[in-house]
Image (cartoon, grey):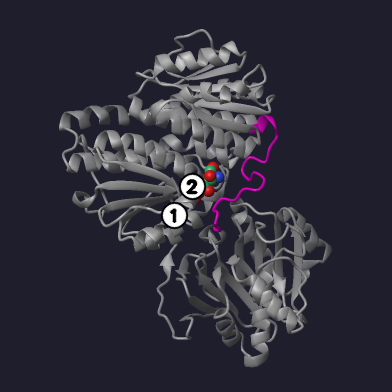
Amino acid sequence: MCGIVGYIGNNAVADKLMDGLKNLEYRGYDSAGIALNDNQKIEVFKAQGKLANLKAVLLQNNISQNPSHIGIGHIRWATHGAPTVENAHPHISNDGNLVLVHNGIIENYKELREKLEQQGVHFYSQTDTEVAVHLFAEEYKKFGSLEAAVRSGLACLKGAFAFCIMHHNEQDKMIAVRKNAPLIIGCNQNENYIASDITALLGKVKKVIYLDDNEMAVVKKDSVIVKDIFGNIVLKKSEEINMKADLIDKQGYEHFMLKEIAEQPIIIRKILQKHVQNNKIILNEDKLNIDWKKVKDITFVACGTSLHAAMVAQKVWENWLNIPVRVEAASEFIYQKNLLNENSLVIGISQSGETADTITALKQAQNLNTQILVVTNRLDSTIVRYAQSVIGLDAGVEISVAATKSYLAQLITFYWVGLYVAQEQNLLSQDEIVSLLESFEKIPEQIEEILSHKSQIEEIAKQIKNYPSAIFISRAFNLPTAYEGALKLKEISYINANAYPAGELKHGPIALLDENMPVIALLEQDETYAKLISNCEEAKARHAFLIGIGGEKLSNIFDAFIKTPKTLSCFSPLLMCVPVQLLAYYTAKALNREIDQPRNLAKSVTVE
Ligand code: M6R
């Protein structure tokens, strides 16, 4: 979604801002802009579309010659108002002296806008953000100090925000403010940054300060002072960044998505090495501060791909732990009655750790006194604040908007945590655990085997690309994989893909089947197999282009078949997800789509 970068120091600011914004591109955006402060007047440059368009605007204006050393930049993912130049950030006050960028949503913007318009303020955009700039500018007239104006203006704002603000009369500072939207300060000698995501600062600073909600930082070239919203100084420690800059490099791959799919065996091996030793599951340095004896029911809350990971966990955990497990889309959980209490465990899953729906669901769970476990790829993210226990995914930064390696890391995490709980609570015998681990530990090499056949999957994708829609079907453990396959295909190829429990096909979706509909069946050779083959026969009888993914090709009805290595049914989602990721990737590639940054999507969805 939106991204913020601010810079104050001795270097040419435009380059610094563009560099930082480039690292945030993966979040998804549809316009961009920067503002420079230490010249005759504040100068704002904006463009619709990608950063290349903004770069062209900067070139036209000879910005490389600009001596500015303080500035702010933004990429915007449109929520209020279309992705136009007017709506792009930075937004500037009517007198041209106060300028800001904003992530989040100002919920009471309509009332504030009306009030400000009555006072004679002129609005030029449709954004919620613009009220903030005019509000702070009005307060500046009263206080004559940026810090005081922002503090006073904040009291009127409802919603979520991370702001980076400058005033032309105070060219020695930027103000950073956060409430329910992440913001960090990157610190160097004689230069400081503000950013909404650590990736913007990789390779630029070694230390960062994480702002908490309702904190405001006055950021100068050689100092950072953090205060609460009442103006009291808050002592903050800076923390070392432990991510490497090359994490946001494609390293020879055509797309981040392909690189991230290829990284999966390495990630899984690393996780397994950390948690499986001598036929036992160990926590290693992870902590699981959950009182399992108290837990009578488990609810997963998540969105998108993370929701599909939860669906797999539900099926596996109910088998192993013998406890009712519920899976709820976070956006539904927050608007329904949830019969949870101190005997409930709520597990929030979020790759980014910034998904607003999931965070709100956890806040509500807190109010119901449940135990809360968070599983995230970003231990520096907002969601961890709502957890009593946190498990990191160890998947490394995921740049492609379409989640792949983080999904597999989520699955692996639920397998080892499930096994750990089963082992510690004596829910599975030692023999059962040993035999499960035997299959579990083979997964990385089995994924490598699937990856080695990617050219065959590419050929099948070249056929899928010719259809306007596709249907995924499966049963049992791989039904979530079917949902995930359909989501991946939709997200990056824009082909309309849906997934159904195979047994549901005949209850309606079968009406869609003819020679123009590919059906992709995920087949597990367990007790569901014979029924699934019957469902495939039903599809074939309607002339669907039939693709099978699974163990042995035991039937000749398939037009194409992708073989996956043999494992236990409960682990098969770990293998089956790889061909569906590759199918989506190669279909999107054949259609020449913008794979890593698909239209309308954002990497972290920070609005409800
Ligand atoms: O960061 P999160 O896991 O909370 O994100 C949830 C969804 O927005 C995310 O999985 C989305 O569906 C991805 N684009 C999937 O590829």
Measured as percent of width and height from the top left, residue 588 is found at 64, 33
Magenta includes 605? yes
Instruction: Specify whether tag 2 is near ligand 1 (CB below 8 Å).
Output: yes
Depth order, front residue of 197/523: 523
Measured as percent of width and height from the top left, residue 34 is found at 70, 67
Q: Amino acid at mark 1?
A: Arg
Residue 378: numbered disc: 1
Depth order, front residue of 308/21: 308
Q: Earlier in the sequence, mark 1 or mark 2?
A: 2
Residue at 49% x, 25% y is 504
* Label 2 element class: loop
484 lies above or below 348? above
464 lies above or below 378? above
Separation of residues labelled 1 and 2 (CA atoms): 16 Å
**Position of 157 compared to 272: left or right?**
right
Residue at 39% x, 39% y is 411
487 lies above or below 239? above
Measured as percent of width and height from the top left, residue 386 is found at 38, 61
**What is the span of residues highlighted in magenta in the rendered image?**
588-608
* Label 1 element class: loop
Q: Is residue 9 visible?
A: no
Residue 303: numbered disc: 2
Please say if the residues under marks 1 and 2 sit with CB atoms less than 8 Å apart: no
156 lies above or below 110? below
Q: In which quarter of the view is residue 449 placed?
A: top left
